Every structure is written in structure tokens, then in C-alpha cells.
């Protein structure tokens, strides 16, 4: 499916000074997520934010994830987190970046994608931070709204499961396959930010999907995409109801 036209205004020149809380909220293949504190937050109508910092060798992966947030702009605040931008900077090779030491220690080439990491070419407005095999040291970050907790464990999933299936269906309408259906990537909608009524299901979803560095854009029909995600979701929910997490 073709990407719908953006509803966002043209980029502006807002300058924010923020500080990073070292209490990490999450960690994955691409990088770490930390809460942000905005200096002078009362001047801006912004929700609580987090920053995802790519590992030293994961800038291209994070750029790919940013591309999918842009691709799914119309369901930000509906099915996925609101995204406030992807930013890069060239830094000194000897710079110490929070999370990089652990990322370097855990880096495994076998954990790379089966196909070369690349940003989908259509409407490529998110540019790759790594050009022509450059050896420059790049810091890449993604700014997102802060979401809630993960799915509960050991309780009935009867009211939760349909909502999450609908969210994956929302993404499928844009031809996006998540490719990383897991407990760690399903989190509650933010309590501090009003959710948007889903244009496809007529109500507000209570959950959000995160982590799109492995995602892909396809021309598969919606029912095929729903079947792919639904098979994994059924296993995940059965295990959660029985009191354990399967990844």
C-alpha cells in the first residue's frame, strides 16, 4: 500500500534542552531506552518522553525503525507510540555514550538481520546515518512518548487479546509486518496522553506496539498479515494466562 500523505505541519525550529535519566527503562538488540526530563517543560505542550539510543553499530537499524514510525504516522497515538523525531550527530570516536559499553560487549553479528539492514526506498525521508561505508562515529536517537507497563502475567487475557489483535490489523492495513511479535514489544497506552479513536475499529486501543527495526513492508493481503501475527499472539497470550512469558 502507498503511504498516505502526511498530516504533520512543515518542520520547525523548536529547540529543547533535555536531561537524560540514567535509570534505563528497556534494552534490546538495537539500543537502550531512557526517560527524558525537559528543562522548562511548562513552556511546551509535550507529554512525558523517552529517548532510544542506538548502540555504536546500530544506527542504521534505528534509522530503519524511524522510517516505520513515519510510515505509520496515521496510527501514531492509535496503535503505536507518537514519535517526535529521529536525530543523528557525528561525535568523537572516543566519546563515552550511555549504554554503548554494554552494547559493544553484547554485539553479535549473528543477531543482525538475515537480509542487509536498509531503509525501504519508497518515500525515503528518513536518511541513513551511515553513508557509503563511512567509518565516522554516529550517535543516533529516537524520541518517543513514554508508554506504560507490559502485558500482565497470570491473569485472564480475554479482554486484552482482541484489542492487541486489532492493533496488529491496523498496522497490516499499511502493509507493515512487525516481524518481532513478543511480550516485550506490547505495552500499555500512556496514562498521561489522550489516545486517539481508531479509525478502523471505532474505539480507543489500550495497548501499543513498539520496536520496528525488524519490520518489513509487504504487498501481502491483510488477512495474510493478520494470520502471521495472530499465530504468535495466540501462543503469547496462552502462556501469559498460564503465568509465564515466552519470547
Image: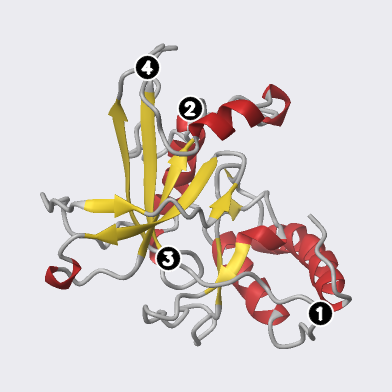
**Element under label 3?**
loop
- Percent across and percent down for residue 42 are 16, 72
Q: Look at mark 4 in the image and give the residue it sits on.
A: 93
Tell me whether the residue at label 4 lies in contact with that at label 2, contact meaning CB atoms closer than 8 angstroms: no
Residue pushed farthest right? 242
Q: Look at mark 1 in the image and give the residue it sits on.
A: 154
The C terminus - image quarter:
bottom right
Mark 2 to mark 3 CA distance (whole Å): 23 Å
Mark 4 to mark 3 CA distance (whole Å): 30 Å
- Percent across and percent down for residue 158 are 77, 87
Mark 3 to mark 1 CA distance (whole Å): 25 Å
- How packed is label 3: few (under 14 Cα within 10 Å), some, or many (20 or more)? many
Q: Earlier in the sequence, mark 3 or mark 1?
A: 3
Nearest to the observer: residue 69 or residue 34 = 34
**Element under label 4?**
loop
Nearest to the observer: residue 67 or residue 107 = 107
Q: Look at mark 3 in the image and give the residue it sits on.
A: 146
Q: Look at mark 2 in the image and give the residue it sits on.
A: 56
- Percent across and percent down for residue 139 are 37, 31
* In the depicted structure, whether residue 82 falls above or below residue 124: below
**Element under label 2?**
loop
Q: Residue at x 38, y 79 (%)?
A: 192
Amino acid at each position: 500500500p502507498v503511504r498516505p500523505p502526511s498530516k504533520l505541519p512543515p518542520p520547525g525550529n523548536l529547540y529543547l534542552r533535555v536531561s537524560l535519566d540514567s535509570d534505563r527503562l528497556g534494552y534490546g538488540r538495537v539500543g537502550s531506552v531512557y526517560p527524558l526530563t525537559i528543562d522548562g517543560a511548562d513552556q511546551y505542550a509535550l507529554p512525558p518522553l523517552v529517548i532510544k539510543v542506538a548502540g555504536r553499530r546500530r544506527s542504521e537499524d534505528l534509522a530503519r525503525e524511524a522510517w516505520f514510525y513515519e510510515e505509520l504516522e496515521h496510527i501514531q497515538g492509535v496503535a503505536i507510540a507518537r514519535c517526535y523525531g529521529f536525530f543523528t550527530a557525528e561525535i568523537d570516536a572516543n566519546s563515552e555514550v550511555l549504554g554503548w559499553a554494554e552494547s559493544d560487549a553484547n554485539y553479535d553479528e549473528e543477531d543482525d538481520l538475515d537480509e542487509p539492514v536498509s531503509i525501504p526506498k519508497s518515500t525515503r525521508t528518513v536518511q541513513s546515518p551511515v553513508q557509503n561505508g563511512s567509518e565516522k562515529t554516529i550517535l543516533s536517537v529516537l524520541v518517543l512518548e513514554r508508554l506504560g507497563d507490559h502485558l500482565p502475567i497470570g491473569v485472564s487475557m480475554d479482554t486484552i487479546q482482541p484489542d492487541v489483535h486489532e492493533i496488529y490489523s491496523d498496522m497490516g492495513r499499511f502493509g507493515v509486518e512487525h516481524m518481532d511479535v513478543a511480550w516485550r514489544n506490547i505495552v500499555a497506552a500512556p496514562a498521561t496522553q489522550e489516545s486517539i479513536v481508531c479509525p478502523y475499529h471505532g474505539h480507543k486501543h489500550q495497548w501499543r506496539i513498539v520496536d520496528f527495526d525488524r519490520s518489513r513492508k509487504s504487498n501481502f493481503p491483510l488477512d495474510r498479515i493478520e494470520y502471521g501475527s495472530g499465530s504468535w499472539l495466540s501462543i503469547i497470550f496462552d502462556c501469559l494466562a498460564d503465568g509465564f512469558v515466552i519470547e
